[in-house]
Image (cartoon, helix red, strand yellow):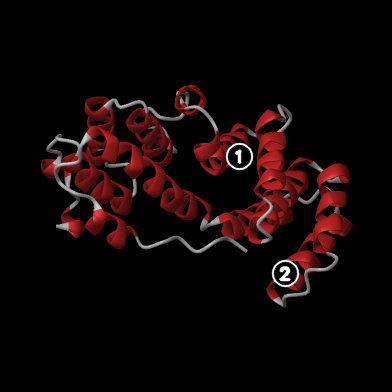
Amino acid sequence: MALPPQSGETFLREVDENLRRDELQGLAKRYGGWLIGGLLMFLAGIGGWLYWQDRQRSESAEQSEILAQTYSDVGAGKMSTVPPRLDTLASDGGDVVRATALFARAAVAIEQNDRKLAVSKFRELADDTSLAQPHRDLALLRGTALEFDSIKPEEVIARMQPLAKPGLPWFGSAGELTALAYIKQGKKLEAGRLFAAIAADKQVPDSIRARAVQVAGTLGVDASASLPASAQ
C-alpha cells in the first residue's frame, strides 16, 4: 500500500558540494519529497505488526477477522470496499484495531493521491490520548512528513522537538525532518550539526546514518568519522 521511495543515491549525486543558500532551499524541497517516500514505505508493514499484536490479545475475534479479510483484499487489489470497512473499524474497534485501521486508511489514501485525507487520519491518531504513545508518535511523524511542503518550518521543528533527540526511537527520521526545516530557514550550520548528530547515534539505522554523513558534508559539517562501517 505504501508509496515506493525515490532513489536516495540519485538525490545525493545531484547535491552540489558547494551549495549556495538559495540552492539549499531547493534541496529542502527535493529532499523533502524523497524523504516522505522513505518515511511512508513501511506503512503496510506497521499495519501487519499491529494486527499481529491484536491477535495476541484479541479484544474482538470478529474485528480481527474483518481486519484480516481487509488486508487480504488489499493484497488482491479488491479495493472497492476497503475504505468503508477500515472506517468502520476505526470508529468501532478496540484501541489496537482502531490504530491499525487508521494507519491502513491513511496508507490507502496516500495510494489514491488523497493526501488531505491521509493527513487527517494521521492527525486523528496523533491526537488520540487513549492510544499508546508509540502509535501517536509514529502518526505525528508520518503526518508531518506529508505536510512538510505546506507548513512553516517553525511548525515542523515544534512538532518534531519531542522526537528529534539522540537516543530516542524516532531520532533519525524526526531529526531529518527538523534539519530540512532548518535548511528552509537558511540555517545551514544548524542543519549540518543535526545531520552530524544523527550520523553519530548508533541507534539510528545505518542507512539513515550514512545519508546524514553525506548531507552534513554538503552543509559544511564533516561527520565522516561517524560513517557506519557497513557504509564505508
Task: Locate residue 231, reporting x and y percent.
Answer: 20, 57
Q: Is residue 198 above or below residue 33?
A: above
Pick the front one: 24 or 120: 24
Within 10 Å of the Cα at label 1, are there few (<14), some (14-19), or many (20+) other Cα atoms?
many
Tag 2 residue = 74
Residue drawn where x is 43% and y is 36% of the image: 174
Total marks drawn? Answer: 2
Q: Is residue 150 above or below residue 11?
A: above
Q: Amino acid at mark 1?
A: Ala
Contact? badges 1 and 2 (CB < 8 Å)? no
Task: Locate residue 74, reporting x and y percent.
Answer: 72, 69
Label 2 sits on a secondary structure element that is: helix
Pick the front one: 57 or 208: 208
| Disc number for residue 139 | 1
Task: Tell which circle, 1 or 2, labels the residue nearer the N-terminal end.
Answer: 2
Q: Is residue 186 above or below residue 35?
A: above
Query: Which of the 4 quarters of the picture holds residue 165?
Result: top left
| Disc number for residue 118 | none
The answer to whether residue 198 of the structure is visible from this angle is no
For residue 3, side relative to residue 204 (left or right): right
Identify the image quadrant of the N terminus: bottom right
The answer to whether residue 10 of the structure is visible from this angle is yes
Residue drawn where x is 15% and y is 46% of the image: 17
Within 10 Å of the Cα at label 2, are there few (<14), some (14-19), or many (20+) other Cα atoms?
some
Q: Is residue 103 above or below residue 170?
A: below
Most extreme residue toward the front is 22
Task: Locate residue 109, reporting x and y percent.
Answer: 70, 55
For residue 229, side relative to residue 57 (left or right): left
Q: Amino acid at mark 2?
A: Val
